[in-house]
Amino acid sequence: MTSANEVESESIRDRILDAAESCVLELGYDARLHARIAERSGFSRPTVYKYVGDQAAIVEALFQREVNKFFVVLDAVLRDEHSNLEIRFVDAIVFTVQYARNHEVLQKGLRDHPELVLPWFTVRSGPIVALTSGLMTPHFERLFTPDELSTVDPKAISEWAFRIISSLIVTQGVIETPDEDSLRDFVRSLLRIAFMAPPHT
C-alpha cells in the first residue's frame, strides 16, 4: 500500500518533470535548467535537485517517464482481440513509430542533441528492451499454440519488434515512409521477407 508521503513525493516529482518538459522544449536539452524548472514548478532549486537530480538525471527521468506513459498506451493497442499475430505485430510497430515521430520532446532531442538520446536506442537500450519484452511477450504468448511455443520464443519476437522500431525511429533509409500507410506497407514488406521460403540449393 502506498503511503501518503510516497504519494506526495510522486506528486512533487511529477510537477517538477512537467516543468522540466516545458523548459526542455523551450530552451533545449543543454540549457541550464534547474533555475527555470524551479521557477516554473514553484519549488526551490534544492527541491528540484532532491527529487530529480542533476541535468543528466533530469533528461533521463523525462525519457523514462515518457517511455512508461507510452507503454500504457501501447498495451491497449496490443489488446485488440480481433487481430491475428501478423496484424497485431504490424499495428504495434506502426503505432510506436508514428507515436515517436510525433513526440515533441523525443524529436527535439534527436534533432538537437542526438548524443543524449541515441544511446537509449543503442548502447543503453537494455532497460527499454526489457520493458518491451515484459509488455509484448504475454500478448504474443496468447497468440501461439503450445506446439508453436516449443519452436518460437515470444521474447525473441518482442526484441525483434524493438529492433525494427528503433531502427525506423533513429535511422534514415532509401525507402521513405512519411505517413502511416507507407510505413505500414514497408513493415509488411519486411515481414514478407522474413517469412520467405529459403532458396533451393
Image (cartoon, helix red, strand yellow):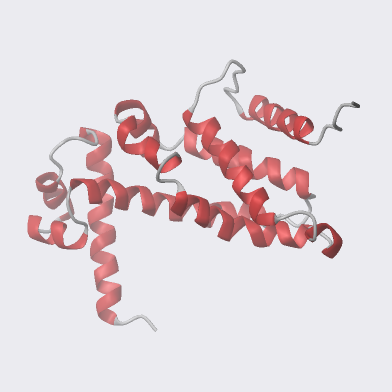
Expressed as whole percent of the image width and height from the top left, the position of residue 79 reads 68, 58
148 shown above or below 86? below
Expressed as whole percent of the image width and height from the top left, the position of residue 115 reads 31, 32
Image quadrant assignment for residue 95? top right
187 shown above or below 93? above
Residue at 36%, 37% (x, y): give it.
Answer: 117
Residue at 76%, 54% (x, y): give it.
Answer: 152
Residue at 34%, 30% (x, y): give it.
Answer: 114
Q: Is residue 69 visible?
A: yes
Q: State left or right for residue 11 relative to residue 195.
A: left
Residue at 57%, 40% (x, y): give it.
Answer: 163
93 shown above or below 60? above
95 shown above or below 152? above
Q: State left or right for residue 82 relative to residue 66.
A: right
User: Which residue occupies the foreground of this view, 127 or 41?
Assistant: 127
User: Which residue occupies the foreground of this view, 12 or 146?
Assistant: 146
Q: Quadrant of the N terminus?
A: bottom left
Q: State left or right for residue 107 relative to residue 72.
A: left
Q: State left or right for residue 191 relative to residue 59.
A: right
Image quadrant assignment for residue 90? top right
User: Which residue occupies the foreground of this view, 72 or 86?
Assistant: 86
Expressed as whole percent of the image width and height from the top left, the position of residue 36 reads 13, 44
Which residue occupies the extreme front position in the image?
201
Which residue occupies the extreme right position in the image?
200
Expressed as whole percent of the image width and height from the top left, the position of residue 185 reads 71, 27
User: Which residue occupies the foreground of this view, 199 or 74?
Assistant: 199
- How many numbered marks, from 0 up? 0
Q: Is residue 19 visible?
A: no
Q: Quadrant of the C terminus?
A: top right
